[in-house]
Image: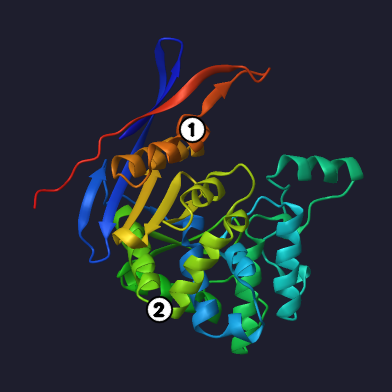
Amino acid sequence: MRIELVRGAIVESVHEVHVAVVDAEGRLRASAGDPGHTTFLRSAAKPLQAVPIVADGAYQRFGLTRAELALICGSHSGEPRHVRTAQSILRKAGAGPEMLACGSHAPWHRHTREALRERGVEPGRLHNNCSGKHAGMLALARAAGWPSEGYQRAEHPVQARLLREVERWTGRPQAGIALGQDGCGVVCFGLPVREMAFAFARLGSAAREGNPAAAEVVAAMTEHPEMVAGEGRLCTDLMRQVRGRLFAKLGAEGIYCVGVPGAELGIALKVADGNRRAVGAAILSVLAALDLLSDEDLGALERHAFPDVVDTNGVPVGQLRPVPELSVPDA
């Protein structure tokens, strides 16, 4: 499939998209582009990385809440509530912000960013969109008795444990998972788009069937979508709108993954050129084509489904529109 930018009467730009729709048994149910395209899962891995925090007991030991678990699964906007929640995770685990290896960047939330600037305050590590994930990794290390230092490195027991979890859900042996370094400094995982979809299908199916760790992760994300992203962002708006029917996670460079427990499906896509602006139109088009969103849902999510391109005065001058091309394999 592709996403077109239309300005006036001209298609000005085109974003090609690789899509895989896979069921919990690993069958490819629909696709577009190359479902076998290999790329990095990036932050869409966070729900998988959160499972050991529950399964291995850190969640229970430190008395973490579902809102805190949702932040661990999320790429938050740096809003005050996100910063407070990351602080709470660290405090419960006996750690501090100085131990976070994610570095700092300005909050994605515009009002928070402007408020810091007006006060002359530099953004800190807690404002990093990955601070929840990093706080969760520190909690996992401390609960297991592993060193806190270097938790982000591939050779650390935390990263070895998370790699095993990615192997578990994707079905791909560790030796076949390409490793890289994510923007926040931790290990990221290279996989075919099809296997990303499979992982989300299996996680959703396991949650529905009562797997305690999977169920807790999915419940955290769907009950607290504001912690997975933030106000005005796709993950939050989508999960709020569908009220528990699916869970969703964005990844950098045009990655988006969705699990649909009731339909036993996982959906993953990669915008080939990595441009995030095409993601909302792409994933909402796929969900609509699969009858997983109603007309009411699409209406509520219209600004994500058909985002405007605006000029410097904020006036719409173009629009992104999807050209769906999902194909269904022969039985």
Query: Residue at left 70%, top 44%?
Result: 109
Q: Element type at marker 1?
A: helix
The N terminus - image quarter: top left
Judging depth in this view, the residue of 217 and 15 nearest the camera is 217
Q: Where does label 2 land, which residue?
A: 211
Work out whether 161 lies above or below 299: below
Judging depth in this view, the residue of 145 and 91 nearest the camera is 91
Type of residue at label 1?
A: Glu
Locate residue 166, reporting x and y percent.
41, 70
Type of residue at label 2?
A: Asn
For this orientation, the residue located farthest to the right is 119
Say few, some or many: other residues with alpha carbon within 10 Å of mark 1 (under 14 / 14 to 19 / 20 or more).
Answer: some
Q: Element type at marker 2?
A: loop
The quarter of the picture where residue 71 lies is bottom right
Work out whether 118 lies above or below 105: above
Query: Residue at left 44%, top 73%?
Result: 214
Say few, some or many: other residues with alpha carbon within 10 Å of mark 2 (under 14 / 14 to 19 / 20 or more).
Answer: some
In the picture, measured across the screen, residue 89 lies left or right of residue 318, that is: right
Locate residue 168, reporting x and y percent.
36, 74
**Label 1 to label 2: alpha-carbon separation:** 35 Å
Tell me, yes or no, if residue 160 can be seen here: no
Query: Residue at left 38%, top 41%?
Result: 294
For this orientation, the residue located farthest to the top is 9
Work out whether 115 lies above or below 131: above
Q: Which mark is residue 19?
A: none
Locate residue 157, reporting x and y percent.
53, 81
Residues at discs 1 and 2 in contact (Cβ within 8 Å): no
Q: Where does label 1 land, which residue?
A: 302
For this orientation, the residue located farthest to the front is 296
> Considering only order in the chain, which callout, 2 or 1, is on the residue closer to the N terminus?
2
